[in-house]
Amino acid sequence: MIGHAGTPVTRADCLAWDREDELAAYRERFVLPEGVIYLDGNSLGALPVQTAPSVESVIRREWGQGLVRSWNDAGWFAKPEVLGDLVAPLIGAGPGEVVIGESTSVSLFQMLTAAVRMRPGRRVVVAEERSFPTDLYLLASVQEIAGGLERRLLGPDSTLDDVLDDDVAVVLLSHVDYRTGTMHDLETVTRRIHDAGALVVWDLCHSAGAVPIDLTGAEVDFAVGCSYKYLNGGPGAPSFIYVAARHHEAAAPPLTGWHGHVDPFSFTPGYEPAPGISRFRIGTPPMISLAALESTLLMWQEIDLDQVRAKSLALTDLFIDLVETRLGAWVSEVVVPRDHAARGSQVSVRVDNGYAVMQALIDRGVIGDFRAPDLMRFGFAPLYLSATDVWDAVAVLAEILETNAWQAPQYAVRQSVT
């Protein structure tokens, strides 16, 4: 808790809390522009200090000097599995259960199709109506390819009991909702899906690196996640794929590229899948992006995710408290559960003219984002944010709302990325 029970939180309270913060030293491990409070780590994580020299080394030494020899000498070919094993402890997976994939969209297509194939005779896939849109777009492609596959959508007021029956093959769920920050109980929900005889595919994009995850303990079947949000892998960093070891032999990837072949350099015309998680590889990995990702994953090996989670909850509690006490006249709703067990590491608020308000906020050095139709979204990355950052961000937002600064014409102009 920041401050004292029953009394308004002051900036001095935030400064005092920051001095005792066990994760405060990690702030120096990131490149953060002077005068910027970055509350968009749930969209693109900040740049770790060690990333640029790591990437430069791969470019100048491994590529520049090693040339094609680096596929062997620098271990390039094995990097997707090596980095997968670095992701594994961050999501509660075992060695050999995670591999770095292509884009999140491609990896999600891989998982969905493989899961559907493992439940022949069942013709229904369940997804959330408010899933990130690409999840639904890809599911539509899987439906078309599979032929006759039905989609059932979970609405905001429906439950799994409303949609699960003996026809359901697979359930696709986002661990943390990208709009509201609402988090599912991974273990309880997975168990309910298994009780119905279905498989589950979890989208971990908004939880990996922000909350402790135990895929093994929850007996999850499949999962995908991106590495450019809380894991700080950089823009366009590749996804990761999790397949429980018990499914490795039965799961058949739909995209059978040569890097997933049992013997890629035999160059045989017929496809034979590699054993284990490697069969979900497709093509040549992007080594520059993997260099950036490796640099941050090595840092993550030393970090206690329980400490990250505790700080995340303290910061989001503080933000909610300050918004409700200082901005109640303008904020119509704080859209995030108050229950810690049901909250990720972001807070969304509804404000009239929210897009323009967010643009004015960004213009003043407080960076969040906007999600249509009406949500201002703020992400809290505990490794480089402080309680004082939260206090100062709300103070800037209050000034914008009190003075109607958001009404300046330039803030109404919609940019292509919101």
Image: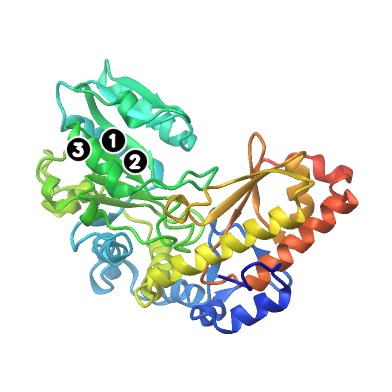
Between the residue at mark 2 and the residue at mark 1, the CA separation in whole angstroms equals: 6 Å
Give the amino acid at mark 2.
Answer: Leu
Give the amino acid at mark 1.
Answer: Leu
Q: Residue shown at 27%/70% (left/top)?
A: 69
Q: Residue shown at 19%/37% (left/top)?
A: 194
- Indicate the secondary structure of the residue bearing disc 1: helix
- Indicate the secondary structure of the residue bearing disc 3: helix
> Vertical placement of 192 versus 36: above or below?
above
Is residue 297 rendered to the left or right of residue 336? left
Give coordinates of residue 271: x percent, y percent: 13, 40
Q: Residues within 10 Å of mark 2 (few under 14, many from 20)?
A: many
Between the residue at mark 2 and the residue at mark 3, the CA separation in whole angstroms equals: 20 Å
> Vertical placement of 177 versus 141: above or below?
below
First reached walking from the N terminus: tag 2 or tag 3: 2
First reached walking from the N terminus: tag 1 or tag 3: 1
Give the amino acid at mark 3.
Answer: His
Q: Which residue is mark 3?
A: 194
Q: Which residue is mark 1?
A: 112
Q: Which residue is mark 2?
A: 108
Pointer 2 with pointer 1, Cβ within 8 A: yes
